[in-house]
Amino acid sequence: GFVVKGRSGNYTTAEDMLICTAWKKISQDASVGSDQTVNTYWQRIKEYFDERNTSGHFRSSDSLHQRWST
């Protein structure tokens, strides 16, 4: 598991691009569609993000959601 030690720095360009890729991939998943809660939706985006994130920064699903809304 992860240990959260305070606030991570700003998102890198690579992380921003990964959020966009994750959002596109998860939002276009026809096998699930719109039949999921907002928490499940962002948890799936976080899982996709975590599997591919090489920045070393921990990002919660809430953080990813907030970054996306920015």
Image (cartoon, helix red, strand yellow):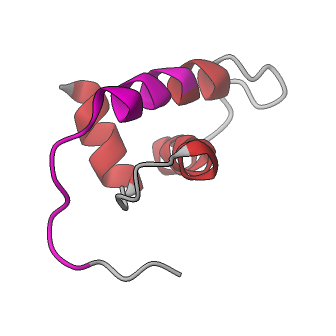
Left or right of 1 on screen, residue 66: left
Q: Residue at x 28, y 49 (%)?
A: 63
Which percent across, then down, holds residue 11?
24, 39
Position of residue 16 relative to residue 9, above or below, is: above
Say if the magenta span includes residue 57: no
Residue farthest along the right direction in this orientation: 31
Position of residue 23 relative to residue 9, above or below, is: above
- The quarter holding residue 36 reads top right
Left or right of 36 on screen, residue 8: left
Q: Residue at x 33, y 39 (%)?
A: 65
63 or 5: nearer the eye?
Answer: 5
Which percent across, then down, holds residue 62?
32, 52
Say if the magenta span includes residue 16: yes
Label tally: 0
Left or right of 70 on screen, residue 30: right
**Which region is colored magenta?**
5-21
